[in-house]
């Protein structure tokens, strides 16, 4: 579905992403992980066409992204950011349907699609009249997911979608999101810094550092055959504190 070829990006004198190659298969869930500033969110924004690369190309479903076609191609991508990114002055209904209305989709189709999505994410229909400030963090993320799915995209992009939630709500939404991914058979690219979350969602994990891909593969492969010491350190840095806490509580 997606072919990234020698993509790079700089901000002034600072390289955000070194020359990068990556392929994503249809129906795959791929998770970009790594420490802050490693380039994972930059790569996601490049895929979404929100920023332009300095070099290289991105081909989506056979079409190379360009300034001429990005608006049309972006309609086949759903994008969810941390904390939802909802418009505060719009109701839930208007937030979810904003692009469909802009594109002048049939009103009956919009209502039918809205009904499907409220059932999919388990959002009570009466909340469609509320505004983002009247929702919990978990509810806002459900609405953000509905908005991303409204136009029935082929590719779903999620940038730290659960990072701002408390642990219990985060756990519940992890279970629900994984079920939704399975039900819809969507191609998904997710950004997270949490290795446990990456392992839970991802068929393929792509570990990045300083704008470079260090290793890509299933979690088991990264854990058992790390490409370099950084891979082992990154996994252990998140795994050991929890193991120590569990041991201390015995």
Image (cartoon, grey):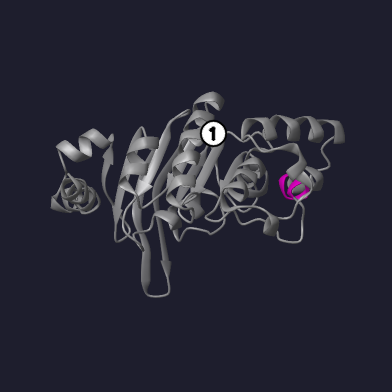
**Residue in view at x 34 percent, y 49 percent:** 194
For the residue labelled by badge 1, is the local secondary structure a helix, a strand or a loop? loop
**In this rendering, would 203 be left or right of 82?**
left
Queried whether the magenta region covers residue 93, the answer comes back as yes
Instruction: Please state the horizontal and vertical placement of residue 2, each as a whole percent of the image.
Output: 47, 37
**In this rendering, would 105 be left or right of 205?**
right
Q: Which residues are magenta?
A: 92-96
Tell which of 135 and 250 is nearer to you: 250
Instruction: Please state the horizontal and vertical placement of residue 141, each as a whole percent of the image.
Output: 58, 48
Queried whether the magenta region covers residue 13, the answer comes back as no
Q: Quadrant of the C terminus?
A: top left
Q: Which residue is mark 1?
A: 61
**Residue in view at x 58 percent, y 50 percent:** 66
Tell which of 135 and 26 is nearer to you: 135
Tell which of 195 and 215 is nearer to you: 195
Instruction: Please state the horizontal and vertical placement of residue 212, each as a whole percent of the image.
Output: 29, 55
């Amino acid at each position: 579905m997606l072919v990234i070829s020698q993509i790079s990006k700089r901000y002034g004198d600072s390289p955000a992403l070194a020359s990068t190659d990556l392929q994503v298969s249809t129906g795959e869930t791929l998770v970009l992980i790594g420490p802050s500033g490693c380039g994972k969110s930059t790569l996601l924004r490049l895929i979404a066409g929100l920023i332009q690369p300095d070099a290289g190309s991105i081909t989506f479903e056979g079409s190379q992204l360009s300034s001429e076609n990005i608006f049309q191609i972006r309609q086949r991508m759903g994008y969810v950011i941390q904390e939802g990114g909802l418009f505060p002055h719009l109701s839930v209904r208007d937030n979810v349907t904003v692009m469909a209305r802009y594109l002048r989709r049939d009103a009956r189709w919009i209502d039918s699609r809205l009904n499907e999505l409220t059932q999919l994410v388990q959002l009570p229909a009466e909340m469609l009249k509320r505004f983002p400030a009247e929702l919990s963090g978990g509810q806002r993320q459900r609405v953000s997911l509905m908005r991303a799915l409204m136009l029935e995209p082929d590719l779903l992009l999620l940038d730290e979608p659960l990072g701002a939630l408390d642990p219990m709500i985060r756990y519940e939404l992890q279970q629900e999101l994984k079920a939704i991914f399975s039900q819809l058979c969507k191609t998904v690219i997710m950004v997270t810094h949490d290795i446990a979350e990456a392992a839970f969602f991802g068929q393929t994990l792509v570990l990045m550092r300083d704008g470079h891909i260090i290793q890509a593969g299933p979690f088991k492969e990264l854990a058992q055959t790390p490409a370099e010491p950084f891979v082992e350190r990154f996994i252990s840095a998140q795994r050991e504190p929890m193991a120590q806490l569990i041991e201390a509580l015995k």
